[in-house]
Image (cartoon, rainbow, N blue to C red):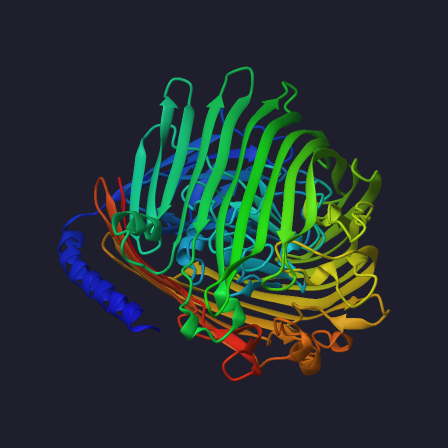
Amino acid sequence: MTKKQANSIFAALLLIICLFANSMLYAQNKKLHQTISGFVYDSASGQALQDVSIVIMGSYPISTKTNMDGKFILENIPIGRYELRISFTGYESQIIKEVLVGSVHQVYIEVPMYENAITLQEVESKPKTLHAKPINPFTVVGGNTFSPEQASRFAGGMDDPARLVSSNAGVTTSSMSSNGLSIRGNAPSLLQWRLEGVEIPSPNHFSDINGLGGGLLCAVSNNVIGNSDFLIGSFPAEYNNAISGVFDIKMRKGNRKLYHHSFQLGLLGIDVASEGPISKSSNATYIINYRYSTTGLLEKIRKDENIGGKLGYQDLNFNLNFPTKKSGVFSIWGLGLVDNVAPILDQSTNRKYLDNGVLSAAEQKAGATGLSHHYFLKNNKTSLKSTFATTYSSNHIHEDFYDIENHKSPKTDLTYNTTNLIFSSTLQHKFHPNHINKTGVTLTNIHHNIHVDHTPYYGQQLINFAHSNSHTNMISAYSNSKIKISNDFTVVGGFNVQHFILNKNTVAEPRVGVNWDALPGRSISAAYGLHSRIERPDVYFFKNNEEELINRNLAFLKSHQFTVGYNQELTSDLYLKIEPYFQLLYDVPIAPIGNYSILNRTDFYTTQSLISKGKGKNLGVDLTLSKSFKKGYYYLLTTSLFDSKYKAADDKWYNTRFNRNYVFNFLVGKEWIFGSNILGVNFKASKLGGQRYSPVDEAATLLHPDKEVQYDENRMFEKQLRCMFIGDLTLSYKMNRGRFSHTFAIKSVNATKQKEFIKHKFNIMTQTIEPYFAANSLFNVSYRIDL
């Protein structure tokens, strides 16, 4: 921990202590209350359910029922955390845990109900804990649901959904400087991001700069997202063009009756959010969030000083919701981000490595916006959802090299723009309480503008590796059915078909899963799926020395994925999950000569000729032990044991870059409620297997004109560094008042300052090859007011 960070923590803690002492006087004399409202609906058809019972467990009791529109209100609920029990004849009862009630914002929840296959009028089923069940009803294994409150509370979350789920079993960040997610040994770039059911480009600030598939922080705001699914392994048929996992993010609706606003100021940025009714008569609502990086703000105020480097970011999230009486629900949603990187050149006398003389400037923009329409047919069994959306990502990177005499020569000039026009439509129908089907189609027009100039050696002229300004199309369709053989046994089956117009490749993907509730509180599940994805445009439009687009006809990268799951509720608040899995990848793009595989890709662009003849395999087991909030504390223990290999052109198997072999996470948190105020302390400890690297070929390195480190390709990723121990911390103190609340927080990722291996470098001062390590971390002190 740096001295500056230590001083910031001390000052923040002193402020919290003073505020705590002052607020205790207020808390002793003022009891505050708030409202819990929500919507309960049939998970199969989406139709509202009337007369559903909602009870606050452990209360007097406090209870209510839904009205004809499926809506409910619980009023005058004291500040604190609660569990809700939702029950309805003919449906599985649900328990929703960790419902946090504050003084300002009304709590709003949406609850899907799952119909029993055999309806017993007089016998009520044992309630199932909703936090253990994914939102997508077709998911039988490998699914996790996360809430924005968890991203704010969990140590290491940093209000970032990607960093939050890195605590899940089977998941780890690719590096501490990035939120890229390596899932079960796969590269972070094999994860798909979705927003409101539409595939979007990576929504991360400074995306792909420190490693393909990740960024510094996620631009999707905690203030706007609702409960969402994070799926890994064998996911349902509706998800296409994804291998390792799917981040299926949903935006929440604004409050229908009241206006709420928030403002947050921290070391990382300024955050402003607002929500409320557009029209109270029509129940139309809005929610919007804007964030601006503090570093960018300080640069504009104090241009003559270097404040932590030249980088800035900003983002915008919004969701407008327009329900109608007869025409369904319309929504307009969107996400946008802008990033700038302009680092400062080191003095030539201070340079240890040649790449210290590389000055890189980057500008990135990304966004997605859409118009969605959700219509429920009058038969109360069928719903149709259609979306027209556009996504955009733009990257411009320019690099110059300055030698010891500060003579400048170009190194890289890259322009990479992609615009997608997307239309998707999904029909969901309940044929019977035991059988629901979801069928859909997606049409995607892909337009790209790529220009990549790069020099292989410092001081030489730029060479063009890719140039294209064209468009192509992708067509996909799926159908998926869920059939309940009995109340204890469920079968899910379907298929997905994709056709890529660029090279006329087509792939059909079967998916199947089963779930058996063997005993009360215990279930066994299994799933298989064939999954595939296309590559990024720069791969297809790489030009070889003969100016040929040699990669244009690459096949889909494909993967057979098998997962088995065992789930058990050990107690009412303690949950165990075990998931063994096996993944077999084939048609993997690899170099025809050498041992390069796309499965190890981390670079922003490729300069490789490729053939679809590689393979990969991942084998492992994930374990989760989760204790939900009860008696003021929670904990989460996750363990992942795995082995990740790939086969190169020499027909030999090698470790992948991401084969750490094991990851252990332990999260624990405690809350103390003092009247209407809440003090939270959260800690995360992680132990990760060491990073993989290949032995250095010293002779080849010394012969290289720039002394760029060369590796022994016959021993790819054979070596492994020592294990890593990382500690994260989140402290918060929330002061609830009648019409507003204050929250003070300290958040730190890698508070233990663990150094991680970046790469080997040639030291021009000592004329030796040495490993380069860096202690990357994130730190934030923030103040937030909610009105």
Is residue 740 left or right of 74 when viewed as pictured? left
Is residue 618 visible in the rendered structure shown here? Answer: yes
Q: Is residue 49 above or below residue 737?
A: above
Q: Quadrant of the N terminus?
A: bottom left
What percent of the width, then of the height, locates residue 413? 58, 50
Picture quarter containing residue 253? top left
Residue found at the very far top of the displayed protein: 326
In the image, 350 versus 310, the foreground residue is 350
Q: Residue at x 44, y 62 (%)?
A: 156
What percent of the width, then of the height, locates residue 699? 70, 82
Q: Is residue 247 above or below residue 625?
A: above
Is residue 439 visible in the rendered structure shown here? Answer: no
Q: Residue at x 31, y 35 (%)?
A: 260
Q: Is residue 105 above or below residue 23?
A: above
What percent of the width, then of the height, locates residue 76? 29, 39
Is residue 200 left or right of 84 when viewed as pictured? right
Picture quarter containing residue 478? top right
Picture quarter containing residue 609? bottom right
Q: How many marks?
A: 0
Is residue 675 left or right of 199 when viewed as pictured? left
In the image, 81 versus 167, the foreground residue is 167
What percent of the width, then of the height, locates residue 338? 45, 43
Q: Quadrant of the C terminus?
A: top left
